[in-house]
Image: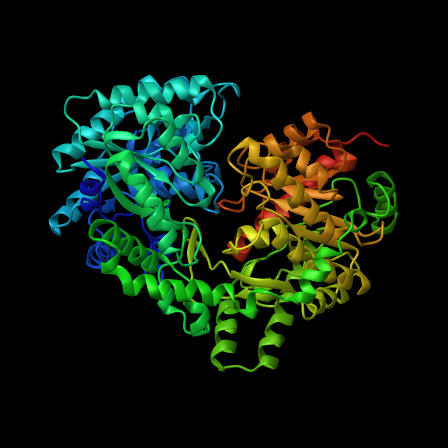
Amino acid sequence: MTAKSAAAAARATVYGYPRQGPDRELKKAIEGYWKGRTGADALRATAADLRRSNWQQLAGAGIHEVPTGDFSYYDHVLDTTVMVGAIPARHRGAVDADALDGYFAMARGTQDLAPLEMTKWCDTNYHYLVPELGPDTVFTADSGKQVGELKEALALGLTARPVLVGPVTYLLLAKPAPGVAADFEPLTLLDRLLPVYAEVLADLRAAGAEWVQLDEPALVQDRTPAELNAAERAYRDLGALPDRPKLLVASYFDRLGEALPVLAKAPVEGLALDFTESAAANLDALAAVGGLPGKRLVAGVVNGRNIWVNDLARSLSTLGTLLGLAERVDVAASCSLLHVPLDAAAERDIEPQILRWLAFAKQKTAEIVTLAKGLAQGTDTIAAELSANRADLASRENSPITRDPAVRARTAAITDADGRRSRPYTARATAQRAHLGLPLLPTTTIGSFPQTGELRTARADLRTGRIDTAGYEERIRAEIQEVVSFQEKAGIDVLVHGEPERNDMVQYFAEQLTGYLATQHGWVQSYGTRYVRPPVLAGDISRPEPMTVRWTTYAQSLTGRPVKGMLTGPVTMLAWSFVRDDQPLGDTARQVALALRDEVDDLEAAGTSVIQVDEPALRETLPLRAADRPDYLAWATESFRLTTAGVRPETQIHTHMCYAEFGDIVQAIDDLDADVISLEAARSHMQVARELAAHGYPREAGPGVYDIHSPRVPSAAEAAELLRTGLKAIPAERLWVNPDCGLKTRAWPETRASLENLVSAARTVRAELPAS
């Protein structure tokens, strides 16, 4: 096919779409099912309605081939675990008794069953459920979900493409099951897994699938020769199947590098590649291997992870270059649109000028369709769209919102001394122990306490005017009193105020900083039914006035025990926002750090002796390629130190991280120079404590003993046993006792019981320590 005919064949598609519905109908239906308010049939009906609505909306917008199988009640990796029959032994009984309840037991756990471990999907803020595999794992095909959803779309008269997690990525994301040797490599199960994929592909073909997409994002990371050989073998074997659909192998989030030649030569009919700025090297690499003669190329030229309007002219230029490199070039977003909100048009409180700069899933779909039309029919057919797009881009570039000379001058004046504490950790630790007077194995929480329906109602009532500010603040004071009182009675050593006034750990601060925009409907799935509204970082950042001092000092006035000041760190403020793409991330991080430094200084001046600056996103934002990591870690750790380095030695700086793989950033954790770090450890059985010990981490740490992402209440004995495991890696004088993460999503009854057990466990293990 010539470049001209390839252009004429260009079509629009997407890899996935937001699942929740315009009013988060899926979240409400699932949580209603969990609480017994609705039945399984009602939940399934809601899900089917949402799928149908998404497909019809996509088709109506001009998407030629809609995705199926991307919809999930909780997580698409967990769906893959079900598809290949890799149900952990402890969950088999629950799954056999009731497939839906067993599915949620794997995701959330029950009082009697621990859930699967949860961690971040590549470098996004989406969490997946980690497959647990071992030498005895037996895979069996269950294509019911994938076939059923394909048939639903085909029944609507649509062209549909099932989307599956690819076999290599599935195994690379898996971990050894509990009780399996830590050095077991799940990838050794590939030959056992491929026949199951072959059976699923055959089922989909029989159900009417012309194409099936296999997602392999793990291949954009640095991979060993053995891993690349596994990818080559997987697609050689799947490509050789006699009765299968056409295969489209998709990879995204970065450049494919050494995996690109492997996939380009594989006997599959198409590749889907990321061609956004972060993966621009894919274009040159594709040309270097001679392109994809005779194959389909799906070009991800619209950023599926950020919300800025596409530069249509630049994308058309990229698409034009690609035309000579494949038999057919189609247009898509760089990844699933799961990672962006649904519809920017729903935002009524953002200035119309700024709204023109934003593209959520619906707007990105329109951009994809426009680009496909321009590629197939010529730019004259989209002249009006190109003109409007140029005006939108110029409006943003020239807006005073994006530039604040005072902020830029302050950032330019930063020196190395601004990021260094006045005394080393050993001297600070002595001063802090004398000042705080804490016992061995001190207990604390991560910050947030349950966000009850009453609190959410109070915030809504304030927004709508049903209560005034005085009434709202009285409600917040009462909640803080209850949280502080409970912690004192439970025997917790370092308290928090519970954060009842905060809607979200990033949004709360973003709403008080210049340069940020808040959305009303910009919900994005983080995990399961947990949705967040990432703010939009549109301009230069500064802090007009204190943000947390008032409520922290109020809480401190209620108790003689130390109350932590709670802030979200600069890297997380970026990672959990839609960050500006018109300047280096390091520059933006330094602006945020300086704003937060002002808050830290004000908290200390108000008498706060313990200040926690959370950085749960430090690991998730780590570039997927090792070559890109040193620069990122340099500015990321610098921005944290810039936030915290101005305090006195006796002021104790904490940080917190959760639900990520920490082993490869232990040096960066050390470089933060925090006095105490708390980390997720309950689901991973204290793995992070061992990693800290192997590194020789010299500071204090609190590996979590309470998994807050499950409704189950850990017993005091269970928490004590985890503590004993932690003590094998971290000495008692440096070990803290805390949950994995904040308690915002938990209910009060389980929170009370779990924290009381946590304190009991600390007392039990403390009594076992040798007398000093």
Q: Nearer the viewer, residue 80 or 497?
A: 80
Relative vertical location of residue 192 with respect to residue 248 in this rendering, above or below = above
Residue at image coords 68%, 33%: 667
Q: Can residue 140 be seen by looking at this rendering?
A: yes
The answer, for residue 44, to whether it is visible in the render is: no
In the rendered structure, the answer to whether residue 55 lies left or right of residue 290 reads: left
The residue lying toward the viewer, choosing from 772 and 425, is 425
Q: Position of residue 235 (x, y in %)?
A: 29, 23
Residue nearest the observer in this picture, 8 or 368: 8
Residue 670 occupies which quadrant of the picture?
A: top right
Q: Does residue 549 sit above or below 217 in this rendering?
A: below
Place of residue 716 in the rendered image (x, y in percent of width and height, measured from the top left): 61, 40
Residue positioned 22% across, 47% down in the render: 11
x%, y% of residue 161?
A: 22, 41
Q: Is residue 483 left or right of residue 198?
A: right
Number of numbered discs visible in the structure rendering: 0
Horizontal side of 600 relative to 150 (left or right) equals right
Q: Position of residue 534 (x, y in %)?
A: 49, 58
Q: In front: 399, or 227?
A: 399
Q: Is residue 2 above or below residue 455?
A: above
Quarter in which the N terminus is drawn: top left
**Quarter of the figure that contains the C terminus:** top right
Does 705 sit left or right of 121 as displayed? right
Name the colouring of the figure.
rainbow
**Residue sitting at 73 percent across and 43 percent down?**
676
Residue at image location 15% in from the left, 44% down from the top: 151
